[in-house]
Amino acid sequence: MIPVEQPALVETFDEDPAPAVSASPARQLWRTVRHSPSASIGAGLLLVLILVAILAPVIAPFGPNTQAGAPFTPPSARHLLGLDDGGYDVLSLLMYGLRVSLLVGFAATLISSLVGTVVGIVAGYFGGFVDGLFMRVTDYFLVIPLLPFMIVVADVWGANLLHIIVVIGALSWTMTAVVIRAQARTIRERTFVRRAQAMGAGHTRIIARHLLPQVMPLVVANTVLNISYAIFTETALAFLGLGDPTQISLGTMIEHAFLRADISEGAWWAVIPPGALVAIIVIACSLLGRAIEDSLNPRLRTAHLSARVFRVRPTRPRNPGRTG
């Protein structure tokens, strides 16, 4: 009797496929918006709000300084959201106020993202003394209660739209810097960065060609999230009376509704719409920002691992001529 050995499980590994060329951040962003329902909803809401703000002078029923009727006129077919205590059309004020709030949000976010990205990349790439110095400064800004500090700075500096933008942007860059610094520390240890250093590439070239493209997805995600934070902060400052008195924003609309007789007169249409619009902006930015972060953040994506394939291979008998 010739013993026949059972087929054995032989563990083999397929060869790693050639790494695919990664798409640009813009193409990845578009892919995320197309395939993520939350990103599509957030991007759609933001796009509609931006278009309404841009076209406000054309589509607004009345001008921002035009008295359209008697104060506290309730909503009607002529005035869809009624009139406030001054007889101004609330819908028109919302459109013009949205322009100012979005301007503050985007401008302040541009400043905070730029400062946070530069600080994070420089600290994470160079490390050592530079990292310690930049992070100590960041820690000091992190422990400062931002809203009270912004109130003091805005009050001392003056209630001006430019001042508000600079204050919000200069004090809200810390979290971006922390996130980008952590990612930069990881990227600088990778093989392609070490190879570029060994070949004599300078720091500027390595940062521009290798480091910055890798952290751009995080920068985009944090930028979108910071827009809602900047708009919310501007609304809070304006509600506290530190907004620009010459500009109409969503925060000043809420402030006027509380300081004047809108609440006591039961004119809910002068209070709820601006607050609801701020909430919609925050929700839209959160949906879009979280979706971008989940899909583009290298730390949240599952790295490619070559699959282990178990194949059944029959083995030959060790002694074919042996009988039992």
Image (cartoon, grey):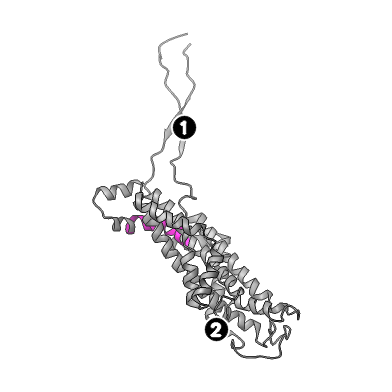
Q: Which residue bears the numbered disc 1?
A: 311
Amino acid carrying mark 2 in the image: Thr
Would you call the spot at circle 2 few (<14 residues within 10 Å), some (14-19), or many (20 or more)?
few
Nearer the viewer's eye, disc 2 or disc 1?
2
Q: Where is residue 216, by image quadrant?
A: bottom left
Q: Does the magenta stretch include residue 214?
A: yes
Q: Which of 317 and 289 is in front in this view?
A: 289
Q: Is mark 2 on a helix, strand or loop?
A: loop
Residue farthest to the front, as pictured: 156
Q: In this view, does 169 lie above or below 310?
A: below
Q: Which residue bears the numbered disc 2?
A: 246
User: Upstream in the sequence, badge 2 or badge 1?
Assistant: 2
Residue drawn 62% across the image and 87% down it? 61
Label at residue 153: none
Please provide percent x and percent y for residue 67. 64, 91
Residue drawn 48% across the image and 11% down it? 1
Residue drawn 71% across the image and 90% down it? 70
Please provide percent x and percent y for residue 213. 38, 58
Number of marks in picture: 2
Q: In this view, does 82 lie to the left or right of 51?
A: right
Q: Which of 308 and 262 is in front in this view?
A: 262
Please provide percent x and percent y for residue 5. 47, 19
Q: What element carries label 1?
A: strand
**How far apart are the alpha carbons under marks 2 and 1?**
75 Å
- Residue 21 appearing in the image: no
Part of the protein shown in magenta: 208-220
Q: In this view, does 128 lie to the left or right of 227?
A: left
Please provide percent x and percent y for residue 37. 58, 61
Q: Is residue 19 above or below residue 275?
A: above
Residue drawn 44% across the image and 45% down it? 304
